Image (tube, grey):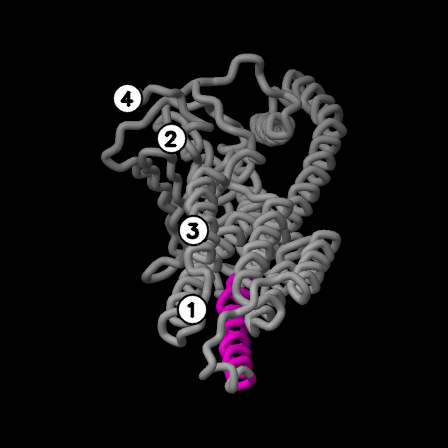
Amino acid sequence: MKRSLPISARWLPGQWPADAAGRKNMALLVQLRWIAIAGQVGTILFVHWGMGINLPVAAMLLVASVAAAVNVVSFAALRHRTDVARAELFLALLFDVLLLTAQLYLSGGATNPFIALYLLQVALGVVLLDRLSIWGIVLMAMLCAALLSFVYRPLGLTDALQGHLFDLHIFGTWICLAMIAVLLVLFMSRVTGNLQAREAYLAQLRQQAAEEEHIVRMGLLASGAAHELGTPLSQLAVVLGDWRHMPEIAAHPPLLEEVGEMQAAVQRCKQILTSILISSGEARGEAPEITSIRYFIDEIAESWRSANPGMPLRCDFGPHDYPRIIADPVIRQAIVNLLDNAREAGATYIDLLVGRDSSSLNIAVRDNGSGFSEQMLADFGKPYRSSKGKQGGGLGLFLVVNVVRKLGGSVAASNGADAGALILLRLPLSTVALEEPADDK
């Protein structure tokens, strides 16, 4: 039998891995560096040949080539990574600061108006890094800017440009500020979106943990109640058995029939308590029961029909070959909960539909009842969200969602095209099925 990964090791549909934000932000830094490299190369060529300012073109293009090589390596590494630590983001920003410092050193130092690009690195650090790392970037930028005031290669200006030095500085400052503004808008919005998605995912995990804690408390309460009720029910079964053999009752057919009905009711209560204990893991057998999909579903349907006479329930397995499965009582209870909810929603018929694909077993319950409101669909699976208007309602669907989620699956709800509701359970075959499919016989 296939062993499924624990829930903490799987990425379920719709989930955002907590560290994926770091990877996406590193990818944005790589993109930003490509833009910086392209801008540097274009500016170097334009200033040197277009404006006639003498620059050490070979050295500056070498610095840009080093940045490009680091970018290629970073991009290749990201393809095989699922998480990026903040320390790696710090090193990436630190590299960008040093790269900018090298280019400024070769092009006039602190007199170069593009020295303001240090502010872009600081702004990115504020969004991406922890407090200590942010101050590390700030101090490094301040130190590099201070050193560039004393140590740098002066620009080689022609005599014609010497008289327009201030105008050139103003023009360069305007271009620098425009670049910073555009890059901040483009990249900060995307970085902030990544961080917001990460926070939303963490909030979802916190909500899930709270719901699971609620389930544990309910399970403990149900298990304790089952143990407490077991003794009086056993006593009732003994008393009713004695009554059945008493001459006064044995000679009175109506009384004997009523005793039989009471014995059946007591037996039904004992079966329900046993199911609760099995679902809580306290009465699970040593050897799991292996059965076929058809037999498992037909048995659930037959039992439900017996408990709900007069309610049509049709099973449809479709043209599929199914693997044999390990019959888990929690799956049985989840399906029964859905059938009960459909009946309570005013359905006059219910369809139990079974299908499969390459990775999951799909079980759907469709009815022609009142369906779901928009609010119910938005809050589907949350505790105490019910359209029945009674106290404690909504726990059935809440338990179904959590049971299926524990098995690594998912639950989806929708309204039918005409009327009624459709609830689909998707159970991973790696969790519930044996490796090899077999015909249901």
- Disc 1/disc 4 C-alpha distance (Å): 71 Å
Residue labelled with disc 1: 43
Residue labelled with disc 4: 439
Is 146 positioned to the left or the right of 295 in the image? Answer: right
Residue 370 in sight in this render:
no
Q: Position of residue 415 (x, y in %)?
A: 40, 58
- Disc 2/disc 3 C-alpha distance (Å): 69 Å
Query: Element type at marker 1?
Result: helix
Q: Closer to the N terminus: mark 3 or mark 1?
A: 1
Tell us which disc is closer to us: 2 or 4.
4
Q: Residue at x 40, y 30 (%)?
A: 429
Q: Position of residue 430 (x, y in %)?
A: 43, 28
Q: Position of residue 225 (x, y in %)?
A: 73, 33
Residue labelled with disc 2: 298
Q: Residue at x 46, y 60 (%)?
A: 56
Three-letter amino acid code of the residue under disc 1: Thr
- Mark 2 nearby-residue class (10 Å; few <14, some 14–19, many ≥20): some
First to last magenta residue range: 166-191
Query: Element type at marker 4?
Result: loop
Three-letter amino acid code of the residue under disc 2: Asp
Q: Does the stretch in magenta take in 182? A: yes
Q: Residue at x 57, y 13 (%)?
A: 286
Q: Closer to the N terminus: mark 2 or mark 1?
A: 1
Determine whether 36 is above or below 211 in the image.
Answer: below
Residue 372 in sight in this render:
yes
For the N terminus, the quadrant is top left
Residue labelled with disc 3: 65
- Disc 2/disc 1 C-alpha distance (Å): 75 Å
Q: Quadrant of residue 418?
A: bottom left
Q: Nearer the viewer, residue 409 or 247?
A: 409
Which disc is residue 89 wearing?
none
